[in-house]
């Protein structure tokens, strides 16, 4: 049995960020990653804000493209162009990005164990035990504290009695050859992606990521979307190699326990408006590292002590997540006819320009912008149907 100060379950960006911070503070940290390589099997558009790139010092080598504009398509095919003078977002090479964070953590002293799938976790008086299957071999690792950061599909929080995330969607994505697509495209249509949207994100002059979110049959929905793009001449027809990933829309009921914290997608720290989880996950990774460091300094790993982590991240992100979820439920009520009408209203009243110039405009924090947008649309609130209750 191997002993560590901290066991980090999951070697994605969030797990590696926590590992880097804690190893840098002198703690013996192990990262248990179920895949054979860091960055394998990732379903993500890889879009982050410029703020995120600068705050977390993302290496230039991990950035495929920079973006300052996008086209938002209504079901009718009409679109709104949104543009800012300065760069708003970066499109990442996710495999390279994940690998870069893991490399930083290793340089600080974190140990990575690959092909190590965590099967169970238990809390003891003296620490935590994580049982792992590593290439068919049953292993047990022990630590003083554990951080669960292995994504939405993790069953470990439920095993600990922390509840489960019941509202979620499935993302489906593939890479395609394009014919001169230079701007990010976002397609809103209940026929294409019920309750959500589809995207075409350029990676280079002739390559792009195409994908969508759906609650049901995401693969079939994506194939239909790709056929539509091919018919429009935007992409080259091809049989897609589709990858899938679950996206939580609400946080986990509780993200802490005695000697355990849950971070990132596993905790539901994801923007309900866009499904983006990198920025919020990295922010919460830093908060988790801070909470663990304080617990070590006090030699107190109790549930009460670690509850400070949840209090901290909810103070910073709780309102954003609540408003984002409310906005998502409002959008679910719209028909394609209603979406087309809202696009017409926005265009005719230059609402999109007003929001772009708003002091609340932010790539990562949508709450106040959502509320401002709803104020602009108040005369047409009947389009959203009955009142939405949380």
Image (spheres, helix red, strand yellow):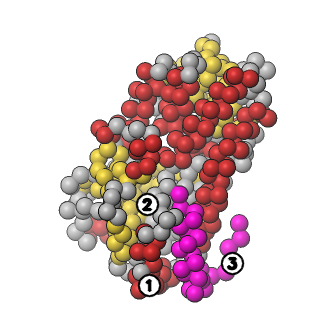
- Residue at figure coordinates x 60%, y 32% from the top left: 289
- In front of the other: 186 or 214: 186
| Residue 368 belongs to magenta span | yes
Residue 185 vs residue 162: left or right? left
Residue 280 vs residue 107: left or right? right
* The furthest residue to the top: 1
Residue 310 in the image: x percent, y percent?
A: 69, 43
Mark 1 closeness class: few <14, some 14–19, many ≥20 residues within 10 Å:
few
Quarter of the image for residue 326 reads: bottom right
Eye-nearest disc, 2 or 1? 1
N-terminal label among 3 and 2: 2
| Residue 259 belongs to magenta span | no
| Secondary structure that dominates the magenta span | helix
Eye-nearest disc, 3 or 2? 3
N-terminal label among 2 and 1: 2
Q: Which residue is mark 1?
A: 349
- Residue at figure coordinates x 34%, y 72% from the top left: 81
Question: Which span is picked out in magenta?
Answer: 365-390
Mark 3 closeness class: few <14, some 14–19, many ≥20 residues within 10 Å:
few
The quadrant of the picture occupied by the N terminus is top right
Q: Which residue is mark 2?
A: 212
Q: Secondary structure at mark 2?
A: strand
Quarter of the image for residue 298 reads: top right
Q: Which residue is mark 3?
A: 387
Q: Secondary structure at mark 3?
A: loop
- Residue 43 visible in the current orientation: no
C-alpha separation, residue under disc 2 versus residue under disc 1: 29 Å
Q: Secondary structure at mark 1?
A: loop
Q: Tell me if label 1 and label 3 are in contact, CB under 8 Å.
A: no
Q: Is residue 389 above or below residue 17?
A: below
């Amino acid at each position: 049995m191997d002993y560590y100060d901290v066991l980090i379950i999951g070697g994605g960006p969030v797990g590696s960020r926590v590992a880097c911070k804690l190893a840098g503070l002198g703690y013996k940290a192990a990262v248990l990653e179920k895949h054979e390589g860091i960055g394998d099997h990732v379903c993500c558009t890889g879009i982050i804000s410029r703020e995120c790139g600068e705050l977390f010092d993302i290496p230039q080598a991990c950035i495929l493209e920079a973006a300052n504009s996008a086209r938002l398509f209504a079901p009718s095919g009409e679109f709104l162009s949104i543009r800012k003078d300065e760069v708003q977002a970066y499109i990442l090479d996710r495999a390279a990005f994940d690998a870069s964070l893991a490399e930083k953590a290793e340089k600080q002293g974190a140990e990575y164990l690959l092909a190590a799938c965590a099967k169970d976790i238990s809390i003891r008086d003296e620490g935590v035990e994580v049982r792992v299957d590593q290439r068919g071999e049953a292993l047990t690792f022990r630590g003083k504290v554990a951080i669960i950061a292995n994504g939405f599909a993790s069953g470990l929080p439920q095993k600990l009695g922390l509840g489960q995330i019941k509202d979620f969607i499935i993302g489906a994505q593939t890479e395609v050859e394009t014919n001169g697509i230079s701007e990010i495209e976002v397609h809103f249509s209940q026929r294409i992606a019920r309750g959500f949207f589809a995207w075409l994100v350029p990676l280079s002059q002739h390559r792009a990521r195409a994908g969508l979110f759906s609650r049901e049959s995401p693969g079939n929905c994506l194939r239909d979307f790709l056929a539509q793009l091919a018919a429009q001449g935007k992409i080259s027809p091809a049989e897609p190699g589709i990858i899938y990933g679950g996206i939580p829309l609400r946080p986990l009921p509780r993200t802490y326990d005695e000697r355990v914290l849950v971070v990132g997608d596993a905790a539901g720290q994801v923007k309900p408006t866009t499904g983006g989880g990198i920025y919020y996950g990295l922010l919460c990774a830093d908060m988790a590292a801070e909470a663990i460091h304080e617990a070590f300094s006090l030699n107190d790993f109790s549930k009460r002590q670690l509850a400070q982590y949840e209090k901290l991240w909810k103070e910073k992100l709780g309102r954003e997540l609540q408003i984002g979820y409310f906005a998502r439920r409002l959008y679910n009520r719209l028909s394609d006819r209603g979406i087309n009408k809202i696009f017409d209203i926005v265009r005719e009243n230059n609402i999109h320009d007003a929001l772009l110039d708003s002091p609340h405009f932010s790539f990562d924090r949508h709450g106040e912008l959502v509320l401002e947008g709803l104020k602009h649309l108040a005369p047409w609130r009947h389009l959203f149907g009955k009142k939405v209750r949380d």
